[in-house]
Amino acid sequence: MKKTFFISTISLILLATSCSKDLNQVPISSGTTVTFYQSPSDFIQGINAVYSDLRGYPDRLANLSEIRSDNIYGVSSLGVRDWDPINNFQKAITGNVYVEEAWSTDFNGIFRANTELDQLAKNGSLIPQGLATRLTAEAKFLRAFYYFDLVKYFGKLPIVDHPLLVPEANALGRSSVSDVYKFIIDDLQYAIANLPATYTGVDIGRATKYAAEATLGLVYMTRSGPTYGVEGPGLGLNEWALAVPLFNDIIASGLFAMNTNYANIFSYSNQSPTTTGNKEAIFDVMYQSGISGTASTYGATYPWQLAPNSYFKTKGDTKSNGSLEMIPVSNDLLNDYAATDVRKSFNMNTTPFVDAGSTESRPFFKKWLDFTKIPTTSRFDWGINFIAIRYTDVLLLKAECVLHGAPGSQLTDVDAVVSQVRTRAGLTSIVGVTLDQLLDERRKELADEGSRWFDLQRSGKLLTVMNAWITAEDYKHQISPVVAGYIVYPVPQSQLDAAPGLYTQNTGY
Amino acid sequence: MRITCTHLLIAITLCGVTFAKSMKAQDVLKRTVNVTVNNSSLETTLKKLERDADIKFVYSKSVIKTDQKITLNASGQGLKEVLDQLLTVHGITYQVINNHIVLNVSPQYEQIKQLEEKKIAERQAAINVFTVKGKVTDEKGVSIPGVTVKLVGSKTLNATNANGNSVTLVAPSPVTATDANGNYTLNVPDGTGSLEFSFIGYITKTVPINGQSVVNVTLEESQKQLNEVVVIGYGTQKRGNVTGAQATLRNENLDERAITRVDQALVGQLAGVTVKQTNGTPGKPFSVQIRGTGSISAGNEPLYVIDGFPLSTATTNGAGNFASGNPLDNINPNDIENIEVLKDAAAAAIYGSRASNGVVLITTKRGQTGKPKINYNAYVGYNQASRKLNMLDGQGWIDRATEIINSQYVADYALKGATANDNATTRLANVGSFQVKYFLDPRWSTPGHPGLEFVDWQDQIFRKGLMENQEVSVSGGADAVRYFISGNYSNQDGFVKNTGYKVYSARANVEVTASKNLKFGLNIAPTYSITEDPGVEGKDNIYHQALSFTPVQEDTVGNYPNVGKNDQYKWSVTTNSVVGKLENIVGETKKYRTLATIFAEYQIIPGLSLRSSLNLDNTDNTSRSYVPYYVASTLLSRTFNAQTNPNLTANTSGSYNTFKRQTFVNENTLTYSKVFNHDHNINVLLGQSYNFDRTDNSAESSSGGYTSSVIQTLNAAAAVTGNTTASQNVLISYFSRVQYAYKDKYLLSASLREDGSSRFGSNNQYGVFPSASIGWRVTQERFMQKIPTISDLKVRASVGVNGTNNLGGDYQSIPTLSAAGYVFGATQAAAIGQAPARIANPDLQWERSVTYDAGIDFGLLNNRITGSIDYYNKLNTKLLLNVQVPETTGFPTFLNNTGSVRNIGEELELTTRNFVGKFQWTTTVNVSHNTNKVVALGPGQTQILIPSSFDISNFILRVGEPVNSIFVVKQVGMLTQADITNKAALFGTETVGDPKYEDINNDGVIDANDRQIVGHPNPDYTWGITNTFRYKGFDLSVLVQGQNGGSIYSLLGRALTRTGQGFTDNAPAFYEDRWRSPDNPGAGRVSKAYSTFGRIVNTDWLYSSDYIRVRDITLGYNLGNLISKKVVQNARLYITAENFFGHDKYYGGANPDATNTDLSGNANYLSPGDYGGLPLAKSLIFGLNITF
């Protein structure tokens, strides 16, 4: 009987062990990071998701760069809008939705890039070598792109180079800005070495070698900006000369050109980046209307971020396109444009209109809006690409490097470029362009493209320009003086709450 | 596997006792002893010997007298020698078994003693001169042989002993027993004193003689309660030895009523078990909650186990419905023998990671050896709505509409001098064109309102629905085979037109004894049900629309406004006629479910048996919907126009969804049960189980309408969209339990279960769930015999750990991918992207609950009063909540185990047998009290506002407050001019006659910041009382149940009574008493009809969920007295009235327990609520139950 007992127990144990592996179930109807990445199209879907996080990039530029800068006087009627604290340099913006969004979306993009890189490292052998290399380069470019966006807004950052589990994330503090840059530069250098110069067919719009070069050029320039005594994007390094060869490579490619018509750069009928389409566009955030119905999966929302809903109503729009209320262009920018500057009437609406019985005459940006292209389904479905890296911008950036002493010629690399820009705008050409003149030209050329705040950061004149502007413009007396700490935004409250003590708040907040 | 070893160790250690090598008796008796005692008791002496010789004496103190004084001086003597000297002289024998020495009384000694006693008895007989006779019968009048009849109360008598000396004797009471016919004769000294009648299984009865020579007695069965065997997890146990908190529903509660679902039978019956009938449509599951709400997101439904087969845990969706089925679906209540509810952790812990919400054990009927018993059970009756929600009638609606229209007109055209008395011409001049919102229908004020019809829409959709049930079962058995076979047909037409539930079910439970040691069994129950429900309950469904529907309509269209060729009444809601919808919309669910178990039981040695079972639960569910264009959209879209509307069926829609759910369970258990030395009762269980659960879904629906107005299937759809999905999980478990009872007095039970679940994260795949409980049968103690009023008393305490693995899906720990698209291409087009939708959480695990329970089971006055009292304290921890994490993970939050909720409660169950005898009256009462508190949320979190699908948040989780506390603005009256003048806080553009709200933060305005906690959804007290009366062949039972202390925050109430609501919708009848003017402020509940300030979540829509309900009245008559037993063994006719009387305080809806709509719209915070729930059905049923 002892035998029977032991046989029974042994058989029970055997039965139990043989089943234990059944506990490792994988989802039947959805992919997982463990099972999904098998064929080329799986990895391509993985990288596409990394691009997907770019979709909020232009909106963020409007909220955190344009509104923050002297381009916008965004004091709302009751002072309770989400953009008020950004515009008004309030100290308590750690919980602001725009600040939260920047941190969360960019880190989600980094997470997705890391997931793709992780999978390529594990299973990349399942796909052709060339594709694996390109996808790796794309993922590294995008990771660098998101990190560069973050470092400009927040300064020091946790460096995440692989998908993190919660315990790891809870222990990963912020690294110094220079370490973050080192990480970014490594990624971009890999991307430059491995990304193709062009794409064809369905791949058009993916990151190219030139997108990476332009980004790395701007990284060197941003590092060269002053520190303001803050752990922000400027490191006070003199790396202007490092940027120039990168820009030169873009120019020498011959793939890009300045459009002779300013309005045509932003035309709904001149989409498609590079080669066959818009030669100004080195890197686009791409949108298409009419694919996704009411969901905002493929369409854009950024075109109306700064344009008031009330104006759309005057255009017969019924879908409440537009911002809750006007976020007006500053008088300073309005008056900066010459009356004959074609960019003035194109970039902003200056025609008064009637809103709720009273006349609204404040100007607002309408650069990305075409009122004949109001989407039929919803206001989240606008179909215009956002040019994230524009050829004109690259030329102007190179000019800036030259003015800072990098190799190049005042005549051909600065004056000629600025004059070309001015001529296109219907203005006269100038010679002996100074850094101040270049900064001013950039402001007018790149208005509503999210460049202004960072241009001011890099110029070293952010505090003086902003405070002078506030004194002149702030008739409602809502804007606080800009102090050095405000060069960067605070770490979002949600992050401080999620892992108390892990991150120290930026000085000034 | 590590824990498995623990289980094994326990088992082996315990079994070691049995398999220990036996020791030779001679060796023991040869041991030498050195013991000296001087005038000590025998007991002390034996103890000394035990220590000295390393032996153990085993004896019963009631047999062996151990108080006699002993003097012994043994040094170096053999044990045998000492024992002979010590015991034999006192008539005690001994026997060596292993290391134990068992003592007994020598038979010869007994004989001598008996002889002496007999002599005394003979002398007593001489003085017992009074003779009492009688007959003892049971409640049914059947004589009982063998009943002990004894004179009680000691009598002192003077007698002469054998030696001729005169002595005073304490006389042993005269005793006899009833003969084969139940008759007895007893001689007693005189006609005083009382006779005690006792018999196993019956309540002992004492009857005074009072000089009577004939004393007939009826004994009632003692409920067999304590020796009754009850089902526990993986086994059975004597009820008296149960140490967990366990409640029983006996089969008479099921058999004697007309019940369509098993959960219906549980309503109001058991303390701590709250059963809510959340639906009024027939066939729908009830919600069952045991001991409160412990989980926020992982569900609170118990685990159901049918005949040892643990079914998949039911999961409710956000709307409170069981979208993928309920374990009790299609289970025929007539097949149920009884139901045991394991409430505390100790009782339930053997089910580990699924037992946190309690376990319901259901046992189906089986055959008994004997000739076949055929049972026919049938009933027929009707059901109808138990109540209506009182809405304004046509006149009341006209009165309210007139007030609103006039106010609107005056407000909008004040500048043009508009007044409420303006006629249509003046209004037309002011407004410019006819608009219903400014104009009154002239017929409203014309006497008899010609051309209009007043419609009570509830009356139009309600009806009396037929209910019927037919069941035949056969049970019986011979030596080798026992069987129970049943077939059942049940049909219930709902009280709402075109709703109904039909079920066909069969069951065969067969057991075969193949050999002395081997038994096989098969239980199989195929069922098929059809539910018709065109979508009656829930937001914007038919009942909600019927309540809101304008009660005034054109008499030309009758009950069919806005259907087919009929237009809507101008002043009416735009909804299509609810009657038209009920008659044309199809909502049909067919469910085919088979439950099957096959098992084998092999007895390895006496007491040790191995049981192995394979179980399969397979459900195939198809649901079909069809909504013809005829009852959809507007008249324009239903009117053919060759140019603009050529295809009428473009608005027809249909869908076809299926799910297949399979649960497969293999369980193997080893049970060892043995009584050692009479007093040590030990039971050991060791088991292992494998549980596989899979659901396959398919969903197809029409897109772009239909191409046919006749064909309903999807081949006639213009296009079809659809998909299929599947999900599965595996649970592997090891468990063990030890139960020990010493003399049935000291009870101990401990269990340990280890569950490995594929749902858990890879780091925590195995969870361990221990429990322990102890009990003390105080009445088994000798000192308790002096307190005869207490016939039974058991004190018990337990602690245990349980879990729930209901993580909201099978793959919550795994980072599944979801779509994240982008745009690429020369021709820009969608590029599909896939990215993880959440962080991997390899640590994800079960929610955990630790429950302490203390209870008393008691019986008083010969068990005339029996009951139990329990106190419990249950702490649920590791709740599944979304916790903030650093975004460096890619996400703002992740699902993690954090936070805790505590439930504390008391339960009382009491049964009193008020009258016994010919007229019997029994009362059963159960009362439960439960309080519930959020103890902690995520790290650093003190509150979470539960999102709302319909408004700003109105439920809150706040530390220190009950789960899902209602968080709204408090209405404190109506605004007067004085309030306005004094700058009372206002919500928006409020004026006089609008509601006044409490400005809790004193900031001068009413807004979302003025929300406060005003109540909680769970009742504090739930209770049920059943009174049963029997007289001759009649039986009557009345079940009353209710609850107190909870609140309903009713979204239906909000839909019907919100401020700013338009005139087209109908409003509740209490709108008659609304605020009309400062001089006529109404009843204080309803503000003025016309308002423009909008609305804010407030206490206007808060109702008490208290109710009292006469759930069931059943009157039966046993025909057994009329029909010969040779023809039928048993026959009973009965009439049942269910839900006929009741009262509740829910004025904003029809059923205080209703849940039908997802109020949070968020799977992380289950918040089902009422947004149009039907009233409960009341039914009147005639039934017949015959056993041949």
Image: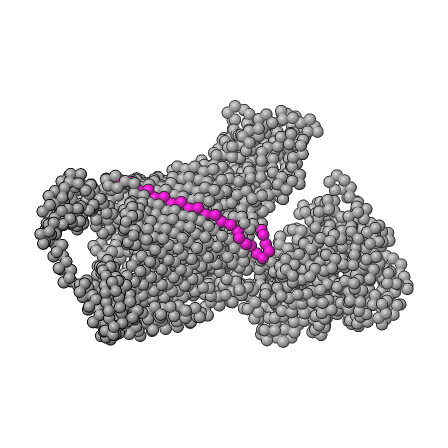
Between A243 and B926, the one nearer to me in the picture: B926
Q: Residue at x 58, y 61 (%)?
A: B837
**Residue B222 appears in the figure:** yes
Between B773 and B687, the one nearer to me in the picture: B773
Q: Residue at x 41, y 37 (%)?
A: B1142
Q: Residue furthest front?
A: B38
* Residue B984 picture location, percent across and down: 65, 35
Q: Is residue B845 above or below residue B863?
A: below
Q: Is residue B190 above or below residue A200?
A: above
* Residue B194 picture location, percent across and down: 19, 43
A89 lies left or right of B688: right
Range of magenta residues? B920-943
The question of residue B135 being in magenta is answered with no
The quadrant holding residue B499 is top left
Q: How many marks?
A: 0
Q: Residue at x 61, y 64 (%)?
A: A170
B763 lies left or right of B684: right
